[in-house]
Image (cartoon, rainbow, N blue to C red):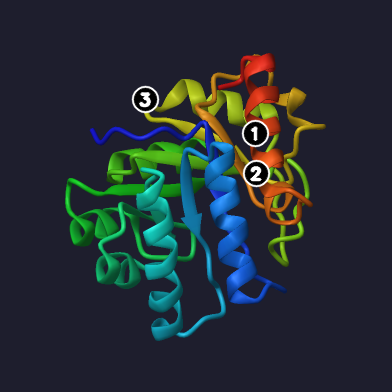
């Protein structure tokens, strides 16, 4: 299996930012210690997505951090990203794996134990599980209990990350659950200092021994 670290899985959100400021915030998060980065662009055209992905990939390669493209296998292949993440309404994990190849990272979303087992059996390298808390990054938020998160962690042998409204002040609910890391969007993207926010999240996670 590919080597990658999901301790601090940073998911971008360019909403409301000019490109230069968006890229600055992405780089600040990388400087702060983000261990893997997902570029999420729900509303860009294919050409726009590829253009911003190339710029973000230049940054992630500089810091030796894997770049995961959300949803779009075509974009991931176009820029030779390290991986792709597929959700429930996206391409099946098995097809993403076939198209990406065995050497690339394929991540998947899961909200139940059967869902998690199915994603693993189809070839997922890691899972994102949530939302643990309500989040502002999606119109609809379906919450996942920490009990379910714990059950998923114990059911599949691949890294499981918690996602959904997480920040340094509320991740204590994850203590004792054998997750591989936390996925964070707003707590970094909207922070006054993305670099400091990323660093503090990692330190808090280490204090709680949750990743």
Local secondary structure at mark 1: helix
- Reading the image, the residue beneath label 2 is 195
**Residue 22 on image: x %, y %:** 61, 66
Marks 2 and 3 sit apart, C-alpha to C-alpha, by 31 Å
- Residue 157 bears which disc, if any? 3
Q: Where 208 sits versus 51, above or below?
A: above
Asked if disc 2 and disc 1 are in contact, CB closer than 8 Å, the reply is: yes
Q: Which quadrant would the N terminus be assigned to in this image?
A: top left
The mark found on residue 199 in the picture is 1
Q: Identify the residue shown where x is 74% and y is 46%.
A: 165
In this rendered view, identify the residue nearer to me: 152 or 64: 64
> Could you give the CA–CA distance between mark 3 and mark 1, rounded to whole angstroms?
28 Å
Q: Nearer the viewer, residue 76 or 51?
A: 51
Which of the two discs, 2 and 3, sits closer to the camera? 2
The part of the image, by quadrant, that contains residue 4 is top left
Residue 74 screen position, x and y as percent: 30, 72
- Residue 127 x %, y %: 46, 40
Task: Classify 10 Å Cα crowding around label 1: few (below 14), some (14-19), many (20 and above).
Answer: some
| Element carrying mark 2 | helix
Q: CA distance from mark 2 to mark 1?
A: 6 Å
């Amino acid at each position: 299996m590919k080597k990658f670290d999901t301790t601090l899985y940073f998911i971008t959100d360019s909403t409301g930012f000019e490109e230069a400021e968006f890229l600055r915030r992405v780089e600040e998060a990388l400087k702060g210690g983000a261990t893997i980065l997902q570029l999420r662009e729900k509303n860009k055209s294919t050409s726009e997505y590829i253009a911003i992905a190339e710029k973000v990939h230049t940054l992630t390669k500089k810091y030796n951090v894997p770049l995961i493209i959300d949803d779009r296998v075509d974009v991931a292949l176009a820029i030779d990203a390290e991986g792709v993440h597929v959700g429930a309404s996206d391409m099946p994990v098995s097809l993403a794996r076939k198209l990406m190849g065995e050497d690339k990272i394929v991540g998947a979303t899961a909200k139940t134990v059967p869902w998690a087992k199915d994603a693993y059996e189809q070839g997922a390298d890691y899972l994102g599980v949530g939302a643990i808390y309500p989040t502002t990054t999606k119109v609809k938020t379906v919450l996942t209990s920490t009990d379910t998160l714990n059950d998923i962690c114990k059911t599949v042998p691949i890294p499981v990350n918690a996602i959904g409204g997480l920040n340094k002040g509320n991740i204590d609910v994850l203590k004792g659950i054998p997750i591989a890391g936390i996925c964070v969007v707003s707590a970094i993207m909207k922070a006054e200092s993305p670099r400091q926010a990323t660093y503090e999240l990692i330190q808090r996670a280490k204090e709680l021994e949750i990743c």
